[in-house]
Amino acid sequence: MKSKITSLSKNAEFKSLLSGKKISNKYSSIYFKKLSGKNSNRFNISFVAKKKLGNAIIRNKIKRRLRNIMNEAYKKIDINLNYSYLLVAKKMIFDDKYTNIKKNLLIDFKKIK
């Protein structure tokens, strides 16, 4: 059985991830970096929806979609647990279909080795 998904909690962790490597598509930007002091047995990922995307209802819906996609992806593909991830949503993610977003994110996570 795979390990649990956890999110980042400290501001310093977010800032250090932003200086790491980046993969972008039309739906999101994925920042990833190896963080010291993080458990490599857990899937460390956080989701960010900026305020300019919409009100709280829209931002929460975007984050729920992303969390659900990553739960499914974590079970299907082999994700590198040595990295911590930060997924920043873009405006297109709210308007497009769930399956298209999922397909693009799976392709991007397969690129990360």
Image (spheres, rainbow, N blue to C red):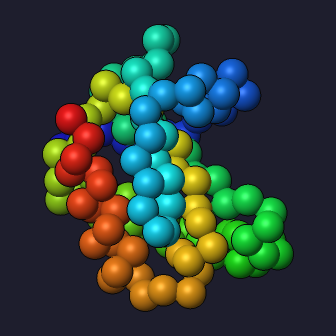
Residue 45 visible, this angle = no
Quarter of image, res 51: bottom right
For the point 30% across and 55% down, which residue is it?
108
Asked whether, in this view, residue 51 is left or right of residue 58, the answer is right
Asked whether, in this view, residue 84 is left or right of residue 56, the answer is left
For the point 44% across and 54% down, which residue is it?
24
**Number of marks:** 0
Depicted 16 relative to depicted 92: above or below: above
For the point 38% across and 58% down, which residue is it?
70
x and y percent of residue 65 in the render?
Answer: 50, 72
x and y percent of residue 45 in the render?
Answer: 48, 42
The quarter of the image holding the N terminus is top left
x and y percent of residue 6 in the render?
Answer: 48, 40
For the point 37% across and 38% down, which residue is it?
43
Residue 15 visible, this angle = yes
Frontmost residue, 19 versus 39: 19
Quarter of image, res 72: bottom left
Depicted 91 relative to depicted 39: above or below: below
Quarter of image, res 42: top left
x and y percent of residue 2 in the render?
Answer: 23, 42
Frontmost residue, 23 versus 98: 23
Q: Which residue of the protein is positioned furthest toward the top in this rendering?
A: 36
